Image (cartoon, coloured by chain):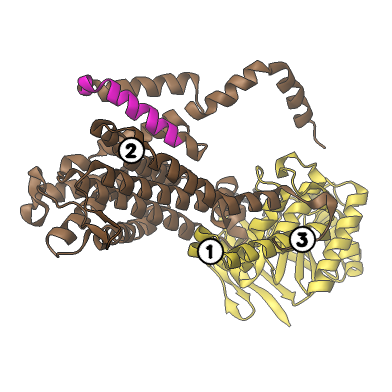
Chain colours: A brown, B yellow
Amino acid sequence: MTRVRPDPDRQGKFLGEMKAQQKSRLYFLGLFVLLGLVPLVLRSEYYLHVLIAMFYHVIYATTYRFILRTGQFHFGAHAFVGIGAYASVLLVMRAGWSFWLAMPAAGLIAAFFAVLIGYPTLRLKGIYFAIITWGFGDTLRFIYMRFKEPFGGPLGIFAIPGPNPITIPGLITIDFSQKTHFYFLALALMIVTLYILHRMEQSRFGLIFGAIREGDRLARAVGINIMNYKVLAFAVCSGLGAMAGSFYAHYTYYISPLDFSVLLTIYLAIYTVVGGQERYAGVIVGTVVLMLAGEVFAGYSHYQLLMYSGFLIVILLFLPGGLISLPGLLTRVGSRAEEKEGEKFRNDPA
Amino acid sequence: MTQLELQKVSKFFGGLAAISRLDLQVQQGEIIGLIGPNGAGKTTTFNVITGELRPNEGEVIFEGQDITGLRPHQVATLGIVRTYQLVTLFPGYTALKNVLVGLHLGARIGFAEAILNSRSHQRKELHLYRQAQEILNFFNLQAVADEPAENLPHGLQRKLGVAIALAARPKMLLLDEPLTGMNPNEVLEMIATIRRIRDRNGITVVVVEHNMRAVMALCERIVVINFGVRIAEGAPQDIQANKQVVEAYLGSDSHAA
Ligand SMILES: Nc1ncnc2c1ncn2[C@@H]1O[C@H](COP(=O)(O)OP(=O)(O)O)[C@@H](O)[C@H]1O
Ligand SMILES: [Mg+2]
């Protein structure tokens, strides 16, 4: 890389972080390859399905969490996932588009809606924003139910085609006749989404989002247009969630208004809190753990929300930082004495 | 040349006029002191200029443009950046990152390139990093670059506050009590720094300050307000000799010296 002034004292944390960032692409590629090997080992369609569902839920949850981190109590993730699903299905089934165009288009449409409702509402704080976004989701659900044409009414839309086959002549054909094909598509979508979110957090944009959290008044005073940043995060995350919604529709071949009720957002909120929203890995852990728990107790699916709520209460009471804070907490208990010493030092000004 | 002009600006809080039909002119490139006892309306004047408060009447004109009612980030974009009476930083961020945020207006990094982390983007980031380092050096803060702002001693926090503001490349700096809580040596250092900011970059500086020695040492012109009304204006020596000013201070404030 380019040389920085050879000041030995100032080799600085920041440059180190920048260097690490240049490598992060490799980690994401590595994760893709690693998870890409799973279907070689795991032959069961059922387990693949569990993983696929996990992948798109990870997309929902991580994008949801990013919006929460901009200080907005978002309660309408289901609205945008739904827009993505319905838009892409209609574009494919009514307008005859290829899935490969319809999916990104669905993302853009959802992002557009996010901008539209974001500008007037993102200045609302706390419960007000929650109510508005929840209401937006429920309004959409009402529209899907009420208008059989083109939304299919309460029964939803049946016989949705899978993604169009991809053929690289003489090499490979992916026609989505097998679970593994969907597996790779879901995996790719998840990795790309995670990479985008990771960059949003680590780049200058993350610096600014953090600054807005740290002190919005000062952020404005140095010229930051907070609303633009909030709308940007809201639109990008809603768009990514909508693409996952599009995948969901073409993967399950059937959507109905019930799929996009506030219950979806409630689940995402639980995943986020249980996993821990401080860090990006926390939400992933929360989603994976709770969805696995959900599978284990699949026979009692009526009680799923109850079980999740139990999890939530336990976490809120005993582990407010979420599951992701557990390893740190354990090591800290192990070396409590040293920690106390450190604390003393840290509180001492200068 | 008049760079900033307040024309009969008033701001009421309930029945109380924090500032009342206040006229103020700031010349391009000067260091001007805005003084007055506690509660005189100095901070309110800053808040009205930067758009944090909307005046009830009157106009704020900056470089010929009516900026009354513009939002704070818009005012900053036009070139007026302020610091706060109570130290205001991004507390969890390191000193370096605080300044990096301050560089926002000059950053010009697009969303797509930031996501892709392209070569040209990395070069821009590195360039910003160097600029931030330069600013830290300018304030003699380089040794604490990686220290969280909240852990810094008060004097350094004040300096960092000004460093963030300077990073925004203002045409005009509004400093709200930049010397409060500093030891005498830090005060002298800050006075020299403020002078250099003006001399080197031609940045106009408006200082609100209670430390009279410092105001006399730093400012070329002084405006005195009391109860939101301008009661005197002139060169430091005139102000010192002004009876009304002395009365205002003796009447309500012990900082007078
Ligand atoms: N946000 C506010 N709400 C109500 N009163 C305020 C507010 N800000 C300032 N004031 C009042 O306005 C007057 C001027 O305050 P201020 O501008 O902070 O004075 P100074 O900075 O000169 O000490 C004071 O009487 C103060 O109590
Ligand atoms: Mg004040």
Give the residue at mark 2: A39
A25 relative to A154, above or below = below
Q: Which mark is residue B71?
A: 1
* Magenta region includes residue A341: no
Q: Residues within 10 Å of mark 1 (few under 14, many from 20)?
A: some
How much space separates mark 2 and mark 3, taking CA atoms? 46 Å
**Residue most extreme to the front:** A170
The residue that appears at 33% across and 38% down in the rendered structure is A39
Q: Secondary structure at mark 1?
A: loop
Q: Secondary structure at mark 2?
A: helix
Label 1 in the same subunit as label 2? no
Q: Which mark is residue A4?
A: 3
Kind of residue sitting beneath label 3: Val
B13 relative to B79, above or below = above
State the image coordinates of residue A67 (x, y, percent, origin top left).
Answer: 43, 47
- Chain ID of residue with mark 1: B
- Chain ID of residue with mark 3: A
What are the residue bounds of the magenta stretch? A283-301
Q: Residues within 10 Å of mark 3 (few under 14, many from 20)?
A: few
Q: Residues within 10 Å of mark 2 (few under 14, many from 20)?
A: some
Q: Between A84 and B174, which is closer to the camera in this rendering?
A: A84
Kind of residue sitting beneath label 1: Arg
How much space separates mark 1 and mark 3, taking CA atoms? 38 Å
Q: Between B152 and A271, which is closer to the camera in this rendering?
A: A271
> Magenta stretch mostly in which secondary structure?
helix
